[in-house]
Image (tube, helix red, strand yellow):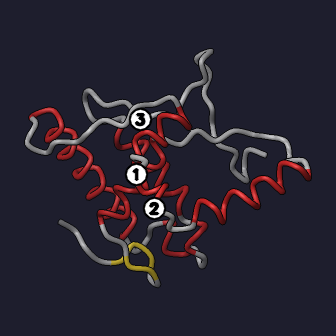
Amino acid sequence: MMTGKLHPKFPWRRIVMTAGLLAIANANAQIVAAPSRTEKAAVDALIPWLLQEDIQLRGIPFSEVIFDATGKRVLAFNPKDETDGRVLKEISGVLDAVTEQLNMPDSVIQGIPRINEVSSHFEDLMHELLNKVPGFSCDFPKTPLGQHNVPVTPTSR
C-alpha cells in the first residue's frame, strides 16, 4: 500500500481517495435555480435541527436516507464475497496507480497552490483508469431519460 503525499502540503491516504471515489460514483449534481426567501428560511431552520444530536434521528439507517434522497439502494459490502473482493482489489489497484502518477514530480498537481483545486485531477484520472479495468464502467449518473447528469464545473459554465 502506498503512503505519502500527493500534494506537498497535504498528506493523503487510500481511505480518503476511496471515500472520494464512492462520493463521485454516487454524485447526482444538478443545475437549480436559487432558492426563494421562503425556501432559504426552511433550509436555514432544517440544517440546525438535523445537526442536533437528538435521539430521534439516531435510529434512521443511513441507507434509508440515501434511498429516500436518490432512489438508489446502498448495497452491503462483504470483502469475503468473491465479487466484492475483486471489486475492492481492482479499485485499490487503480487508487495505487492514481497515487503513483499524481506523486510524480512532474505531475500537474505538484504546481497547484490550493488543495481545493486538485480534486478534478483525481476524479479525471480515477475515471480514466477505472474505465480501463476489464468489466468495469465508471461514468456520471444518468437521468431517467438516459442523459448524463454531469456536474457543473468552472470550465463548463
Image position, residue 125 (x, y; %): 43, 50
Q: With 33 as the anchor, is 12 left or right in this view?
A: left
Query: Which amino acid, mark 1?
Result: Gly
Q: Evaluate if marks 1 and 2 touch, with contact meaning CB atoms under 8 Å apart.
A: yes
Relative to 134, residue 21 above or below: below
Relative to 9, residue 123 above or below: above
Compute the Cα span from label 1 to label 2: 7 Å
Mark 2 lies on residue: 55
Q: Residue at x 44, y 70 (%)?
A: 106
Compute the Cα span from label 2 to label 3: 38 Å
Q: Residue at x 44, y 39 (%)?
A: 64
Whether residue 40 can be seen here: yes
Query: Which amino acid, mark 2?
Result: Ile
- Quadrant placement of the N terminus: bottom left
Q: Residue at x 64, y 62 (%)?
A: 49
Q: Residue at x 31, y 31 (%)?
A: 136
Q: With 128 as the anchor, is 51 left or right in this view?
A: right
| Among numbered discs 2 and 3, the one appearing first in the sequence | 2
Residue 59, numbered circle: 1
Residue 138, numbered circle: 3
Image position, residue 73 (x, y; %): 40, 31
Furthest-bottom residue in view? Answer: 9
Image position, residue 129 (x, y; %): 35, 43
Q: Nearer the viewer, mark 1 or mark 3?
A: 1
Q: Secondary structure at mark 2?
A: helix
Image position, residue 26 (x, y; %): 47, 41
Compute the Cα span from label 1 to label 3: 33 Å
Q: Secondary structure at mark 1?
A: loop
